[in-house]
Image: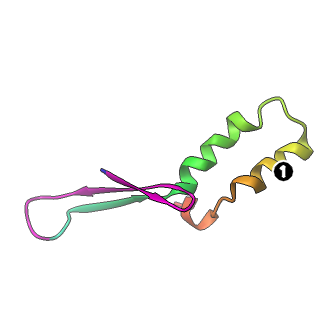
Amino acid sequence: YHGIEASKGELGFFIYSDGSGVPYRLHVHGPSFNNLFAIAKMCKHHMLADIVTNIGSIDIVLGEVDR
């Protein structure tokens, strides 16, 4: 695993090798994925209007999160 700082958080790469020159498996962990899980703690005990604002403030890119 190697993480680098991206504009919206940590961008992580999992690279698995079988010893050849080509990766056996590659997995990219985007910054929006971590930010999505923070919503549960951010929005606990808030009103619905505040939840909409909280979700908009962390600017999640759904294309990164869709698996």
Name the residue rendered at 8%, 60% in the picture: 19
Name the residue rendered at 30%, 50% in the picture: 1
Image-based side of 36 in relation to 20, left or right? right
**Which quadrant of the view contains residue 20?**
bottom left
Image-based side of 58 in relation to 50, left or right? left
Which residue occupies the extreme bottom position in the image? Answer: 22
- Residue 15 in magenta? yes
Residue 37: % across, % down: 61, 43
Residue bearing the label numbered 1: 52
**Which quadrant of the view contains residue 32?**
bottom right
Q: Amino acid at mark 1?
A: Val
Name the residue rendered at 69%, 59% in the picture: 59
Q: SS of the residue at dot 1?
A: helix
Residue span colored magenta: 2-21
Residue 65: % across, % down: 57, 59
**Which quadrant of the view contains residue 40?**
top right
The total of numbered circles placed on residues is 1
Name the residue rendered at 26%, 61% in the picture: 25
- Residue 65 in magenta? no
Image-based side of 21 in relation to 47, left or right? left
Name the colouring of the figure. rainbow
Structural crowding at the residue carrying mark 1, measured as other residues with C-alpha within 10 Å and reported as few (<14), some (14–19) or many (≥20): few
Q: Look at the magenta stretch and give its main secondary structure.
A: strand
Residue sitting nearer the eye, 65 or 30: 30
Which residue occupies the extreme top position in the image? Answer: 45
